[in-house]
């Protein structure tokens, strides 16, 4: 019995394989087309009313910006792929960056700029003992770490420093060339009028029955801020 060549089998294989390859190429091409935010920053992000804030962005795709409340210096609408602008908010402002690209899913990123206006604000400064950038140390019965307060304008000043609720530790606080002892439930005026921005070094004793391995993982204080142009509280 003579066997026929298996031409149909090869033809079926091509019919099945080509659509699969085509689908794979389409998926890869689509993923390469997804929009991407490479950089989007607002500096500084905590300011006094009317201070300049620099917005910078870099995207892959077509970019569009929305500012709420509106800004006279950065209008809503399309912007270049890479750009920067300076705005001067008088109230807390959100800057939204929307990016689209053909065949890709749109993406969105938001920068919130907090504006101190009217009543003083309260900021919580925390130093994580598990964060190497806080340069934590635990020796001779004391734990020490540093808060790097970078996101604040130099015009945002310290009014008072106070202990965080339910934190019963006594702190040695160092900032802007000054030092003071903060006991639970007290309020300090020692750092008044210094910029909130900068390094805050916090030190506290290791509690009775605790070790460097079992102490609470963060050091924390509260800071009331003010903008001197608005008058002192």
Image (tube, rainbow, N blue to C red):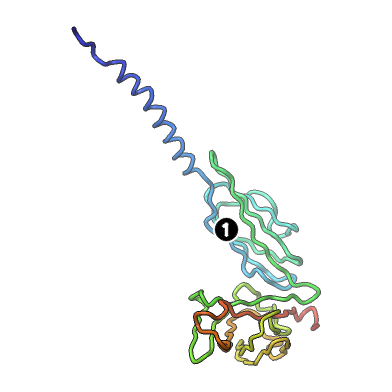
Horizontal side of 123 relative to 213 (left or right) equals: right
Tell me the quarter of the picture where residue 153 sits.
Answer: bottom right
Q: Which quadrant would the C terminus be assigned to in this image?
A: bottom right
Q: Which quadrant would the N terminus be assigned to in this image?
A: top left
Q: Residue at x 69, y 52 (%)?
A: 76
Task: Please give the residue where the numbered disc 1 appears in the rendered image.
Answer: 57
Mark 1, other Cα within 10 Å: few <14 / some 14–19 / many ≥20: some
Coordinates of residue 189 in the picture (x, y in percent): 72, 89
Coordinates of residue 65 in the picture (x, y in percent): 65, 53
Front position in the image: 69 or 211: 211
Q: In this view, does 129 lie above or below 36?
A: below
Q: Which residue lies furthest to the left in this view?
A: 1
Q: Residue at x 54, y 42 (%)?
A: 104
Q: Is residue 59 above or below residue 138?
A: above
Q: Is residue 2 above or below residue 46?
A: above
Coordinates of residue 39 in the picture (x, y in percent): 54, 59
Tell me the quarter of the picture where residue 197 sits.
Answer: bottom right
Front position in the image: 74 or 189: 189
Front position in the image: 219 or 233: 219
Coordinates of residue 176 in the picture (x, y in percent): 61, 87
Front position in the image: 164 or 227: 164
Circle 1 SS class:
strand
């Amino acid at each position: 019995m003579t066997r026929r060549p298996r031409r149909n089998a090869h033809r079926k294989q091509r019919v099945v394989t080509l659509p699969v390859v085509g689908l794979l190429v389409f998926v890869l091409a689509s993923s390469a087309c997804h929009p991407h935010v490479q950089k989007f920053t607002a500096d500084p992000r905590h300011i006094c009313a009317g201070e300049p804030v620099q917005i910078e962005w870099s995207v892959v795709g077509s970019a569009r910006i929305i500012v709420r409340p509106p800004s006279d210096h950065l209008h809503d609408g399309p912007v270049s792929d890479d750009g920067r602008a300076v705005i001067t908010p008088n109230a807390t402002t959100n800057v939204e960056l929307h990016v689209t690209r053909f065949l890709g899913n749109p993406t969105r990123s938001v920068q919130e700029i907090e504006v101190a206006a009217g009543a003083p604000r309260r900021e919580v400064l925390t130093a994580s003992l598990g964060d190497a950038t806080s340069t934590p140390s635990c020796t001779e019965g004391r734990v020490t770490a540093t808060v790097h307060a970078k996101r604040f304008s130099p015009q945002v000043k310290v009014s008072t420093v106070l202990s965080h609720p339910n934190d019963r530790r006594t702190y040695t606080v160092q900032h802007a060339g000054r030092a003071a002892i903060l006991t639970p439930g007290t309020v300090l005026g020692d750092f008044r009028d210094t910029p909130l921005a900068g390094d805050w070094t916090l030190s506290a004793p290791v509690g009775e029955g605790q070790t460097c391995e079992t102490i609470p993982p963060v050091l924390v204080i509260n800071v009331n801020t003010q903008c001197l142009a608005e008058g002192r509280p």
